[in-house]
Image (cartoon, helix red, strand yellow):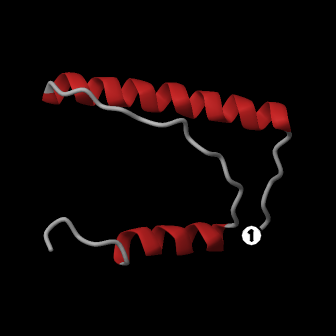
Amino acid sequence: MSAVIPLDEEQRDALQELLNISMGQAANSLAQLIETKIDISIPKITSVTPTQLYTLLFCLLYTSPSPRD
């Protein structure tokens, strides 16, 4: 399955809001756990194929500088 399912503007806005709420709750939980303020940005929604997603994740995991370096 390599097709991108298009979202209309209302679906895209709803998904973005759901992600925004979820990330806000996650950031709040982490902030309480480590007793530090955490700033987050509004998530950006982009449609990609599974192959594009794999490429993006591969680049993030294997081409970013490692914190241990």
The quarter holding residue 18 reads top right
Residue 49, percent from left and from top: 70, 66
Residue 65, percent from left and from top: 28, 72
Looking at the rendered image, the quarter that the C terminus falls into is bottom left
Which residue: 81% across, 44% down?
A: 7
Specify whether 1 is left or right of 58. Answer: right
Which residue: 21% across, 21% down?
A: 32
The quarter holding residue 8 reads top right
Which residue: 55% across, 34% down?
A: 19
Which residue: 40% across, 24% down?
A: 25
Judging depth in this view, the residue of 3 and 36 nearest the camera is 36
Q: Which amino acid does label 1 sit on?
A: Ser
Judging depth in this view, the residue of 40 and 5 nearest the camera is 40
Q: Mark 1 points at which residue?
A: 2
Specify whether 16 is left or right of 23. Answer: right
Image: 39 above or below 64: above
Residue 42, percent from left and from top: 54, 35
Residue 55, percent from left and from top: 55, 75
Image: 39 above or below 48: above
| Dot 1: element | loop
Image: 47 above or below 30: below
